[in-house]
Amino acid sequence: MATVVDLTGERQRVVCVCNHTIFDGVVIKSRVVRLLPRGGAEALCRCKAWVAVPVTYAPPGTA
Ligand SMILES: [Zn+2]
């Protein structure tokens, strides 16, 4: 099942398995974020787990 995030709707919080809020709907609370080739991104939690965050990246010129 694909995970679909609608950024136009309710702000979505993302909480890691360690109960750390990694994304509060506005700010990614991680110093390390990586973009995924297939879209979306992951943030490195303080517990060293990668957590998917609802971020999209559009390269310049495609918007
Ligand atoms: Zn964590």
Image (cartoon, grey):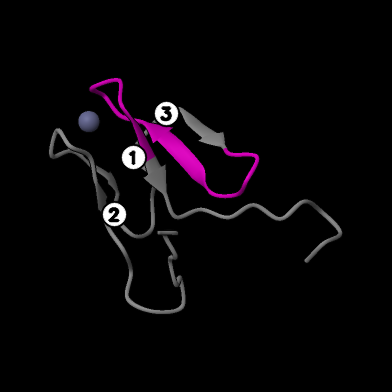
Mark 1, secondary structure of its residue: loop
The residue indicated by pointer 1 is: 29
Residue under the image location 31 percent in, 64 percent down: 12
Mark 3, secondary structure of its residue: loop
In 3D space, how far apart are the residues under numbered discs 2 and 1 (Cα atoms)?
8 Å
Q: Predominant secondary structure in magenta?
A: loop
Residue 43 falls within the magenta-colored stretch? yes
Mark 3 beta carbon near ligand 1 (under 8 Å) = no
Residue 30 appears left or right of 13: right
Residue in front for this viewpoint, 40 or 20: 40
Task: Tell me the amino acid under the disc marked 3.
Answer: Arg
Task: Tell me the amino acid under the disc marked 1.
Answer: Lys
The residue indicated by pointer 3 is: 31
- In the rendered structure, are the residues bearing label 3 and label 2 in contact, judged by CB atoms less than 8 Å apart? no
Residue under the image location 82 percent in, 62 percent down: 62
**x, y percent for residue 10:** 32, 76
Mark earlier in primary sequence (2, 1): 2
Residue 61 appears left or right of 49: right
Task: Tell me the amino acid under the disc marked 2.
Answer: Asp
Where on the picture, by quarter, is residue 30?
A: top left
Mark earlier in primary sequence (3, 2): 2
The residue indicated by pointer 2 is: 24
Residue in front for this viewpoint, 39 or 47: 39
Magenta-colored span: 36-51
Quadrant for the N terminus in the image: bottom left
Residue 39 appears left or right of 42: right
- In the rendered structure, are the residues bearing label 2 and label 1 in contact, judged by CB atoms less than 8 Å apart? yes
Vertical comparison of 45 with 8: above or below: above
Mark 2, secondary structure of its residue: loop
